[in-house]
Amino acid sequence: MASSSGNSSVCTQSQLQNSGSEEDLIQLMDQRKRKRMQSNRESARRSRMRKQKHLNDLMAQATQLNKDNKQILTGINIVTQHYLNAEAENSILRAQMTELNQRLDSLNEILNFINTSNGIYETDQDLQTSSESFVNPLNLIYLNQPIMASPALFQY
């Protein structure tokens, strides 16, 4: 019996040693598991922080781009208005030029008529009297009229 009790005490000691090493192994695994969980939490926190920073950067960039876009649109509107004003002014100037060219042509015709009529009159006094009576009615009718082109005629 002594041997059997000796065997059982050896088994019990080895079981205790095995169970002690198993407990150490379980504790070691639990410790590694806790470290891994802590590391994963830190990694997830850093990832969330990176995502938040990236989102903030994108929001700031979108705000800046919207601001730039508004400035560009304002500039385009100003340039467009200047262009339309210049077009209207050009139209007015073209109309005035056409009217002045017509007046110039009429005046040239009158001068040509007067110059060709010079040989008809015998004295300078007759020429002067005749020229005055001929030119004065034209001055009243055509020469003293204002140029009629104005911005109101060319509204877009």
Image (cartoon, helix red, strand yellow):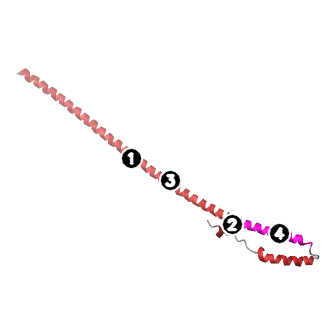
Q: Residue at x 6, y 21 (%)?
A: 2
Mark 1, other Cα within 10 Å: few <14 / some 14–19 / many ≥20:
few
Q: Are marks 4 and 2 in contact (CB under 8 Å)?
A: no
Q: Which residues are magenta?
A: 92-119
Classed neighbour count for the residue bearing mark 3: other residues with Cα under 10 Å, few (<14), some (14–19), many (≥20): few
Report helix, strand or loop for mark 1.
helix
Which residue is located at x 8 percent, y 22 percent? 4
Residue at the spot of label 4: 109
Mark 1–mark 4 distance (CA, rounded to whole Å) = 89 Å
**Within-10-Å neighbours for mark 2: few <14, some 14–19, many 20+:** some
Which residue in the protein does label 2 denote?
92
Horizontal arrangement in the rendering, residue 120 relative to residue 88 (left or right)? right
Write down the residue under mark 3.
Answer: 65
Q: Quadrant of the C terminus?
A: bottom right
The crowding category of the residue bearing disc 4, from other C-alpha atoms within 10 Å (few below 14, some 14 to 19, many at least 20), is few
Judge depth for marks 4 and 3 and give the one in front: 4
Q: Amino acid at mark 3?
A: Leu
Image quadrant in which you'd find residue 8:
top left
Location of residue 14 with respect to 131 vertically, above or below: above
Choose the circle earlier in sequence order: 4 or 3. 3
Return the residue at label 1. Answer: 49
Residue 45: horizontal and vertical position, in percent? 35, 45
**Mark 1 or 3 closer to N-term?**
1
